[in-house]
Amino acid sequence: MTDSVMRDFRQSVRRLRSRPTYTIVTVATLAIVIGAATAILAVVNATLVRPLPVPHGDRLTQLFLMPPGETAWTSRNP
């Protein structure tokens, strides 16, 4: 099994060396996708997964001021 894996690996490397444009585009695409996924996961982790860095974060509230006579949520002021 190890011989067949090494043979496949050598053949893959040979094919990639024979087509440098394809290799560059593939590596660049992988780098961009991995970087974007890392950035998105970091934002999700920081905003949704990790708890708030304050004591009793589950008891926080947010107050809004509404102009007199307004009932629409779009006219609220934080």
Image (spheres, grey):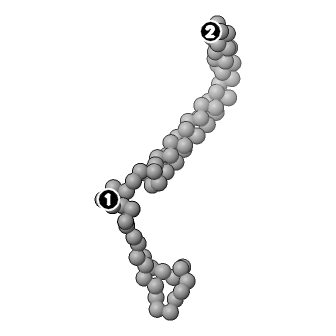
Q: Amino acid at mark 1?
A: Val
Residue 7 seen from this side: no
Q: Amino acid at mark 2?
A: Thr
- Look at the numbered disc 1 and give the secondary structure of its residue: loop
Q: Nearer the viewer, mark 2 or mark 1?
A: 1
- Look at the numbered disc 2 and give the secondary structure of its residue: helix
Q: Which residue is mark 1?
A: 54
Residue 36: image x %, image y %? 54, 44
Instruction: Give the residue displayed 65% in from the left and 24% down from the top.
Output: 20
Instruction: Give the residue displayed 39% in from the left and 53% down from the top.
Output: 51
Question: Would residue 56 appear left or right of 31 to someone viewing this image?
Answer: left
Q: Nearer the viewer, residue 78 or 27?
A: 78
Q: Nearer the viewer, residue 71 or 12?
A: 71
| 33, above or below 6, in the image | below
Q: Which residue is mark 2?
A: 2
Specify the label residue 16 is tagged with: none
Residue 41 seen from this side: yes
| 40, above or below 67, in the image | above
Q: Cα distance, mark 2 to mark 1?
A: 54 Å
Quarter of the rendering occupied by the N terminus: top right
Q: Residue furthest left?
A: 55
Residue 11: image x %, image y %? 68, 14
Structural crowding at the residue carrying mark 2, measured as other residues with C-alpha within 10 Å and reported as few (<14), some (14–19) or many (≥20): few
Question: Would residue 22 appear left or right of 65 to someone viewing this image?
Answer: right
The quadrant where residue 74 appears: bottom right
